Image (cartoon, rainbow, N blue to C red):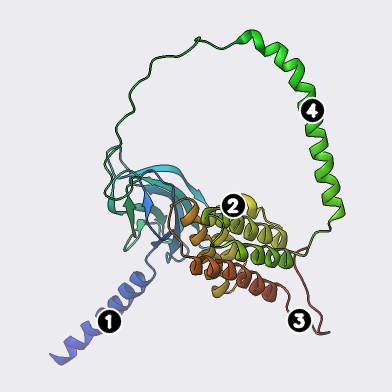
Amino acid sequence: MFTRSRRWLLPAVLAAGAAATAAADAPTLSIEVSPGSVRVGDRVEVMASARGGGDGLWGEPTVAVTDEGPWALVDGPTAVAGARPPAWTLVLAPLELGEQPLPDISVSVRMPGGDTVSATADAPPSVEVVSVLPEGDEPPEPAPLRDPIGVAGFPWEWVLPAAVVLLPLGLAVAWWWRSRGRSETEARPALPPLAELEALAEALGERVGRDPADGVCDRLAAGLRRYLERRTGEPAGEMTSFELRLLARQRGWPETTQRLVQRVMYVADGVRFGRRTCPDDELHAAIGGAVDAARSIEAFLEPADSDGTAVGEGP
């Protein structure tokens, strides 16, 4: 009896080990979404990354959105060029208020043995969707219609005489403005990328508490994007905040640097687009974070060579 039990023990152990290995290598998706709350209709950037699957062949993602659902698919999914394992980006827009889980995202994976499985996220994140109206406010009443005043219609008879007078004047002003801007640019040499960002940070620090916070954040976000564009050669000035985080990840910058870039853009976007109130000390911290991020990038891009000189990557 004991001998018969031992004959069944080895196949059972081997089967359990194979099942554990298959479960550990089962393909899944990792879903990342920008932090913070959004308003109804805002664009929400999402990245889905492949996990596991061994040498399986990944297909294209499918997003489970419906006409009556709480989400609308605005753009994508779009494959991230050069990502290994594969990753995709997509843009969603929430249509309902409250805590809204992201729609199910799945990808078909053809395994080396020929079987096809569906990879999904184990725990897809949720997004807090708030109203576009301030809390407690009632929907505004439409303004009453007013009676028309004066002559109706566009005065076309004045278009040609006005064009004859204003067109030469406008061309002369445009030529003078371009000549003035060109001469000022040629007379003022450009600062190095880090020095330019530090000068901007110093000027912005003096404007905190005096100028509106959204204006300070506009200049801060533009300054950080210009530094990244000059230092890496990538079109950072045209990138979204999500694409900037992806650029930092692809360049292999330190984790602390990536978090600094993400924090600065989160504060700037929250004030500019989310109408979020930002205390002065938080604005000062964001301005200092942009400089700290740039200095850490400089240290990463300019390691000391054997002669003790710095090796740079950008202009």
In the image, residue 220 above or below residue 159 = below
Residue 9 placement, left or right of 21: left
Q: Where is residue 238 in the image (x, y as percent from the top left)?
A: 62, 49
Q: Quadrant of the C terminus?
A: bottom right
The answer to which of marks 2 and 3 sits earlier in the sequence is 2
Q: What element carries label 4?
A: helix
Residue 60 placement, left or right of 313: left
CB under 8 Å between discs 1 and 2 = no
Total labels drawn: 4
Characterize the local packing of mark 2: few (<14), some (14-19) or many (20 or more) Cα atoms within 10 angstroms.
Answer: some
Toward the top, the furthest residue is 157
Q: What element carries label 2?
A: loop
Characterize the local packing of mark 3: few (<14), some (14-19) or many (20 or more) Cα atoms within 10 angstroms.
Answer: few
Q: Which label sits on residue 239?
A: 2
Q: Which label sits on residue 32?
A: none
CB under 8 Å between discs 3 and 1 = no
Q: Which amino acid does label 4 sit on?
A: Leu
Q: What element carries label 1?
A: helix
In the image, residue 197 above or below residue 3 = above
Q: What residue type is labelled 1?
A: Val
Q: What element carries label 3?
A: loop
Residue identifier under label 3 = 304
Q: Residue at x 34, y 28 (%)?
A: 143
- Quarter of the view holding residue 308: bottom right
Residue identifier under label 1 = 13
Residue identifier under label 4 = 171
Q: Residue at x 53, y 70 (%)?
A: 285
- Quarter of the view holding residue 28: bottom left
The answer to which of marks 1 and 2 sits earlier in the sequence is 1
Q: What residue type is labelled 3?
A: Ala
Q: How far is mark 2 from mark 3, CA to CA?
A: 31 Å
